[in-house]
Image: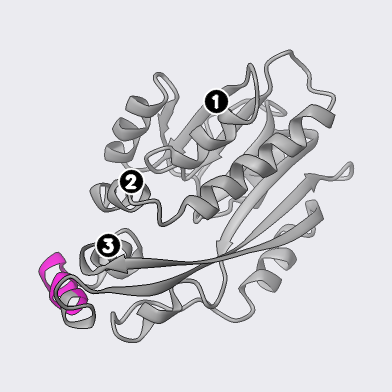
Amino acid sequence: MVSARLRVHDAGVLDPVVNAVAQAAAALVPGMQVHTDAPVIIDLGAGPGHYLSAALGGVEHSRRVGVDLSKYCARALTRRIPGGAVVADVWRDLPFVDDCADVVLSVFAPRNVDETARILRRGGRWIIVTPAPDHLGELIEPMSMLSVAADKSDAISAAVGERFNIVEHTVIRDRRDVPASTIADLVAMGPTAFHRDRDEIERAAHAFAPGSSTTPVTVAVTVTVCQASVDR
């Protein structure tokens, strides 16, 4: 799964998402009254670290930590951001003190509302990226992928609304032409991989995009920016 993520990012398929995270982080920090000269960015469910690295690229002198349950992701993240990985379950109590973060990222990752509210300083921002219903839509049926609920964005707003103020929702949508090998990686990097083995995924991908052909795939996500409320 980690290798598939790395190959998908190397192929540039998710560049629109990476760029959106970088822009969102860069837009937030300069106008914030941070508590030190080095804003703290924590990525919960960081994977190999592409999104945390992108956020850092837009924020000078920032300090950064990526959290992931997978030790394999942590190793990959450490290669990208030396010393920046913590192995932990984001659904449990996080190993950080109260009010320590200026920005928290949750990109294609679980959202622990209570713990994020605890570690995010007052006025800090939480950047959440979730797939839109048409994300990878061309692959859902032929590759037997899990679909995204039509009301996912509304459900997230409801879940975080008691502890955070929603600042903005931005929809990012693009299309990429991908070969069978990348189709297989897109499936293998997500939750569908827990239900199908790699050989089965690759056979289905080559049947869908045979030979050297490519197929257009939609990349569609919602970027939600939340601000820690005063009354949390």
Q: Quadrant of residue 82?
A: top left
Q: Which residue is mark 1?
A: 64
In front: mark 2 or mark 1?
A: 2
Answer left or right for 164 relative to 41: right
Residue 12 percent location from the top left of the image: 40, 51
Q: Please, what is the three-letter code of the amino acid marked with disc 1? A: Arg
Number of marks in the rendered image: 3
Q: Which residue is mark 3?
A: 182
The Cα atoms of the two marked residues, 2 and 1, are separated by 22 Å
Magenta-highlighted residues: 197-205
Q: Please, what is the three-letter code of the amino acid marked with disc 2? A: Asp
Q: Which residue is mark 2?
A: 10
Residue 96 percent location from the top left of the image: 58, 28
User: In the rendered view, would you say 151 is above or below 47?
Assistant: below
- Direction front: furthest residue: 212
- Direction top: furthest residue: 37
Q: Which mark is residue 72?
A: none
The local crowd at label 1, few if under 14, some if 14 to 19, many if 20 or more residues have their Cα within 10 Å, is many
Residue drawn at 30 percent across, 82 percent down: 144
Residue drawn at 14 percent across, 74 percent down: 211
Residue drawn at 58 percent across, 35 percent down: 55
The Cα atoms of the two marked residues, 3 and 1, are separated by 30 Å
Going from the N terminus, do you reach mark 2 or mark 1 first? 2
The Cα atoms of the two marked residues, 2 and 3, are separated by 10 Å
